Image (spheres, rainbow, N blue to C red):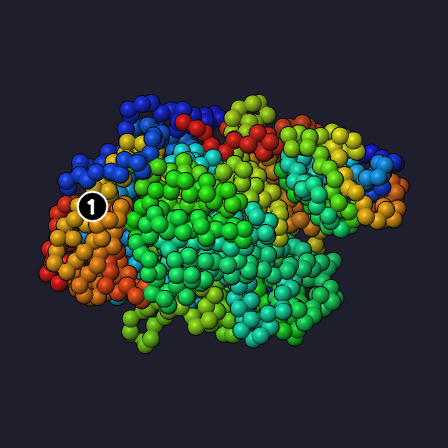
């Protein structure tokens, strides 16, 4: 299991990374591993403005469909078109090519409040029986 | 011998072959509106023997109650008596048109009336509507009735529906369809509704609680009257999911413990065949305060000895299905209840619970069973084998097929990891249950010694393990001729 | 009772294994004052007694066969013997939903056949493994259209030709969703209002109504629902309607009849987005209204919004073709409150009957059935139209079913003819208070020329 140290995490298993002005968001390695083979991704329309914690899309495997939530408030400026044809990219490279959306944040301080890799790792360990 | 899988109909089709042939036209022919005719139609062309062999071969690829032990939890795979089928096929019923005048349909109407009475008697409710086609429709009817009730009292603000986390997925889906807001309730350490959490979740916006009792862990809700009492105290109503009614036959009437409205699954509790997914029948029963809201029409009789007629209840939520429900399934349930009577009902309920507890007493020595209580008609084990940690519930399920037994319900309820939900029903005898335990014992030692055998299972079925990921990714939903 | 299999010796051994003394000890969680209630039911009966009693009940229904001209949502069609013979095989009938595909290939492959043949018949890319009946299919289609618009369009426009009880069912399904159900012709917003207005005054619903529907569709409208052939049997040319609606972002839902499609252009060819139908004519008994078969199809684009089970093709680990339930994440058992619908049980055995029926009929057989319905209903209409006081509007195209204006209340005609063993059709006053002098007559391949002639002379005598 990989816990990328350069990104921050949400309890709902998304990660977020600052990339210049925008925040890139995807799902964690832990999340893709528990979902299994991702077969479909539903992403929002570019230009939409959503609040932190709003569901912006759905990631589906054969056995589960998971809503994915905004790590920060802001406008959706780009979505990952690659996932339409090859959703399995999320399984293969969750922190890289498998990103979901890019957000123009309206309040950067929200980003700073997210979990570190270390805290997230401890959090996921607490989820196991 | 592994049974061969026949080619698809379109693959077998050859131009010009016929099965059914219609009589010649005995009236003068009219002209067709040319511009509306279809360009072509390609249906398979086979002979009647070809069609009969094809579907017979297909049938032989299935496990079924009549051929295999089928302990699917929450599905109540009990024996489907053959007399049910004969009664539903009586020509006076089978060929009877639903819009035939009521006075010419008194046989069907009387049967419906008496089934309404039977179901009310078994469950302790005031009135019953037979219209819902399946449990999910019964649920939708029930929640819609609760909404209509609150609205009729000027309490449209009540929008929250509490649902325990062990509930079937239909419950939250139904609440959304009915325009209400589902709120999940946790279970306590004994598998009951967490009373503290229940009280905290109740407020002025409470519309209802949906409760399955026994719940999907197969456990009877120990504080049922306290739970229903709390909901009533806050002005809410209680919906009972009747999916697990088999355990309660003759042992408890849900209407006696504060449930206000409940659906039945006639295809579970009252032995109508499951048909590979349907048709079912999901009558809904209501306490007196909700009776005026039942979907309709229902059958009533003005006076003893007088004719039966269809009536729509005074404040009915309306029709939920075309005509009056799945009448053919209702005949089968009526037959079943008539044969069993009061004492037979209790015998069914008792033996369903006896069989489940016996199986549990043996399986809890093999696999983890979380709740150390007597169960009702079913119980949930975890598919975790000591010394074979990489084996999953799915592997065990697939390997059971090789031993000629259908797998239990797997990965449900969601609150138990690697769940195996086992419901033997009263139809099975001790010998069959023992054989199931022996198969599990064998599989567990295989898991430790030859785990590959389980990962690769099934081996003895017409097909090896099927790729469900591919089915979604390369979506093929029909064959083009 | 012979359905419980344990002997007393079994029971003793089992109780010992559990560690309790009696079966009653297993029920201590049940509140004591309510435990083991006296059920107000009679004592058990033998199979012989039960059979006698229920046979007697069945005989209290009036039996008609060739002399019934009743349609209105369920029709008397020929069912080849092989249909009930094969569908009643208990390997099909007593199996559950195919959740273990390796042990359910019979059910799954048969459902795939159903989906394949129905896709061809409807001209659609996707057909699911069935809904409860035609009425619930239409209601779910409306919900699906509203959901596909993601809450931005909350109006459903319904043609006046839709079966009145379908409209009621749709009302029940939609009442919680703040969706406006609009019947264009009378500006009527609910089934109740439609009924109290005596039905639409604009009947017959000709091509003009399609134009009005297209014009009335706006940015609030999720879909337009048209039944073709409609409740009154009349048929219309839907060409061009879909284009007009799509230009406004509105979906076209067509409810159709599978026998009609044996001859006529399918809704898919006219650009319909969702197609529904009542599958009862495909080898399913009348059985006093159910179980029937809800046909439900859509475009591939909309498949993830579609409610109900779907069978898909795949391969096993050795590459052999097989079938599984697929796209399950749309459904309630996974998606819970976000599911496309709460539907789980479907009408699988009825879909199997439809598969067997269509396999036996083939394209030639289905064409023959459709042609016989067409010719016989037109012959009947022409003969009845000749009678004094009776009229069949002559500018209407219809299939299998048509409306007759009758000189006295239709209820009286139905009552009078029933005593002679003829059911002449449906008194439209039962659905529309303003149409008591109209009779809806259905004629199928089951009615011979002699039957039709007998109907005509019986009608002549009542007038």
Residue under the point 17% across and 39% down: B29
Q: Measured from the top left, where is residue B11 in percent x and y?
A: 40, 24
Q: Which residue is mark 1?
A: C378
Instruction: Say whether residue B27 is visible.
Output: yes
Is the residue marked by circle 1 packed among few (<14), some (14-19), or many (20+) residues within 10 Å? many
Instruction: Say whether residue C16 is visible.
Output: no
Quarter-of-image position of residue C164:
bottom left
Report in which chain the residue with disc 1 lies.
C
Lateral position of residue B462 relative to residue C293, left or right = right
Q: Measured from the top left, where is residue C167 in percent x and y?
A: 42, 57
* Residue A4 drawn above or below residue C55: above
Lateral position of residue C81 relative to residue C219, left or right = left
Residue under the point 55% across and 67% down: B146
- Is disc 1 placed on a helix, strand or loop? helix
Q: Nearer the viewer, residue B307 or C375?
A: C375
Lateral position of residue B247 relative to residue A30, left or right = left
Q: Nearer the viewer, residue C30 or B33?
A: B33
Q: Quadrant of the C terminus of chain C?
A: bottom left
Residue under the point 34% across and 30% down: B40
Residue under the point 57% across and 64% down: B239
């Amino acid at each position: 299991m990989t816990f990328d140290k350069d990104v921050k995490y949400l309890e709902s298993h998304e990660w977020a990374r600052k990339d210049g002005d925008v925040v890139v968001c995807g799902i964690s390695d832990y999340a893709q591993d528990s979902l299994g083979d991702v077969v479909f991704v539903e992403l929002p329309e570019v230009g939409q403005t959503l609040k932190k914690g709003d569901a912006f899309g759905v990631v589906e495997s054969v056995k589960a469909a998971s809503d994915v939530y905004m790590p920060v408030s802001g406008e959706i400026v780009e979505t990952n078109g690659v996932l339409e044809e090859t959703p399995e990219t999320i399984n293969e490279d969750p922190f890289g090519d498998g990103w979901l959306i890019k957000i123009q944040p309206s309040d950067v301080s929200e980003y700073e409040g997210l979990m570190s890799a270390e805290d997230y790792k401890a959090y996921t360990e607490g989820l196991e029986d | 011998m592994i049974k061969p899988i026949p080619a698809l109909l379109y693959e077998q089709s050859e131009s010009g072959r016929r099965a059914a042939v219609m009589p010649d036209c005995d009236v003068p022919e009219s002209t067709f509106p040319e511009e509306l005719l279809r360009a072509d139609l390609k249906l398979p062309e086979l002979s009647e023997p070809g069609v009969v062999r094809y579907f017979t071969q297909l049938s032989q690829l299935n496990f079924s109650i009549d051929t295999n032990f089928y302990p699917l939890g929450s599905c109540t795979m009990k024996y489907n008596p053959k007399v049910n089928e004969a009664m539903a096929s009586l020509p006076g019923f089978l060929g009877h048109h639903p819009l035939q005048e009521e006075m010419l349909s008194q046989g069907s109407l009387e049967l419906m009336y008496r089934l309404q009475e039977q179901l009310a008697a078994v469950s302790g409710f005031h009135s019953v509507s037979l219209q819902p086609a399946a449990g999910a429709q019964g649920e939708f009817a029930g929640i819609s009735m609760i909404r209509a009730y609150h609205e009729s009292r000027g309490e449209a603000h009540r929008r929250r529906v509490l649902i325990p986390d062990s509930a079937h997925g239909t419950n939250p889906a139904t609440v959304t369809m009915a325009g209400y807001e589902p709120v999940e309730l946790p279970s306590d350490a004994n598998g009951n509704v967490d009373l503290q959490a229940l009280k905290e979740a109740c407020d002025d916006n409470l519309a209802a609680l949906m409760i399955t009792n026994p719940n999907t862990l197969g456990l009877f809700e120990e504080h049922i009257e306290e739970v229903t009492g709390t909901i009533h105290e806050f002005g809410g109503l209680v919906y009972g999911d009747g999916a697990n009614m088999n355990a309660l036959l003759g042992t408890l009437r849900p209407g006696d413990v504060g449930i206000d409205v409940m659906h039945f699954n006639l295809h579970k509790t009252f032995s109508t065949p499951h048909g590979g997914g349907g048709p079912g029948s999901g009558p809904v029963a209501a306490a007196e305060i909700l009776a005026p809201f039942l979907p309709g029409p229902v059958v009533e009789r003005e006076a003893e000895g007088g004719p039966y007629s269809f009536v729509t209840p005074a404040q009915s939520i309306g029709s939920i299905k075309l005509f009056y429900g799945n009448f053919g399934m209702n005949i089968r349930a009526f037959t079943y209840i008539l044969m069993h009577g009061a004492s037979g009902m209790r015998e069914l309920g008792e033996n369903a619970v006896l069989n489940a507890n016996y199986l549990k007493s043996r399986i809890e020595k093999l696999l983890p069973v979380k709740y150390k209580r007597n169960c009702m008609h079913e119980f949930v084990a975890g598919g975790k084998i000591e010394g074979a940690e990489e084996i999953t519930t799915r592997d065990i399920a697939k390997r059971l097929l090789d031993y000629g037994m259908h797998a239990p319900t797997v990965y449900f309820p969601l609150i138990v990891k690697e769940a195996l939900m086992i419901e033997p029903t009263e139809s099975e005898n001790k010998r069959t249950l023992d054989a199931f335990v022996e198969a599990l014992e064998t599989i567990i030692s295989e898991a430790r010694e030859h785990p590959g055998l389980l990962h690769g299972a099934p081996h003895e079925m017409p097909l090896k393990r099927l790729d469900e990921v591919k089915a979604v990714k390369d979506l093929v939903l029909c064959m083009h001729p | 009772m012979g359905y419980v299999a344990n002997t007393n010796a079994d029971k003793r051994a089992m109780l010992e294994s559990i560690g309790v003394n009696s079966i009653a000890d297993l029920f201590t969680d049940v509140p004591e004052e309510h435990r083991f209630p006296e059920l107000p039911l009679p004592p058990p009966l033998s199979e012989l007694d039960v059979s006698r009693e229920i046979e007697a009940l069945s005989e209290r229904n009036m039996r008609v066969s060739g002399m019934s001209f009743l349609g209105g949502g369920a029709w008397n069609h020929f069912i080849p013997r092989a249909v009930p013979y094969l569908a009643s095989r208990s390997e099909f009938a007593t199996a559950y939903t195919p959740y273990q595909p390796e042990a359910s290939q019979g059910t799954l492959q048969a459902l795939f056949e159903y989906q394949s043949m129905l896709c061809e018949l409807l001209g659609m890319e996707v057909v699911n493994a069935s809904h409860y009946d035609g009425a619930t299919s239409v209601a779910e289609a409306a919900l699906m259209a509203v959901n596909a618009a993601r809450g931005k369009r909350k109006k459903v426009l319904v043609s006046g030709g839709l079966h009145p009880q379908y409209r009621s069912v749709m009302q029940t399904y939609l009442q919680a969703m703040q969706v406006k159900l609009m019947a264009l012709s009378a500006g009527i917003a609910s089934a109740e209002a439609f009924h109290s207005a005596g039905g639409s005054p604009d009947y017959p619903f000709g091509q003009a109504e399609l134009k009005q529907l297209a014009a009335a569709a706006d940015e609030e409208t999720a879909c337009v629902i048209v039944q073709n052939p409609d409740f009154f049997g009349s048929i219309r040319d839907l060409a061009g309607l879909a284009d007009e609606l799509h230009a406004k972002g509105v979906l076209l839902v067509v409810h159709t009849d599978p026998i009609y499609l044996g001859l006529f252009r399918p809704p898919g060819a006219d650009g319909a987005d969702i197609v529904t139908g009542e599958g009862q004519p495909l080898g399913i008994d009348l059985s006093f209204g159910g179980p029937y078969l809800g046909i439900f199809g859509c475009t591939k684009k909309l498949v993830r919004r579609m409610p109900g089970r779907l069978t898909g093709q795949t391969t096993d680990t050795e590459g052999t073709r097989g079938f599984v339930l697929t796209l399950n994440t749309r459904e309630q058992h996974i998606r819970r409150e976000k599911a496309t619908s709460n539907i789980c049980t479907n009408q699988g055995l009825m879909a199997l009957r439809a598969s067997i029926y269509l396999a036996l009929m083939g394209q030639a057989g289905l064409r023959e059935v459709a042609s016989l319905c067409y010719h016989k209903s037109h012959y009947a209409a022409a003969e009845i139209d000749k009678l004094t006081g009776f009229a069949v509007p002559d500018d209407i195209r219809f299939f299998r079913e048509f409306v007759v204006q009758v000189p006295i209340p239709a209820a009286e005609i139905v009552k009078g003819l029933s005593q002679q063993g003829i059911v002449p059709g449906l008194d439209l006053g039962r659905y529309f208070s303003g149409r008591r002098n109209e009779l809806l007559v259905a004629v199928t391949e089951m009615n011979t020329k002699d039957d039709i002639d007998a109907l005509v002379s019986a009608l002549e005598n009542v007038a």
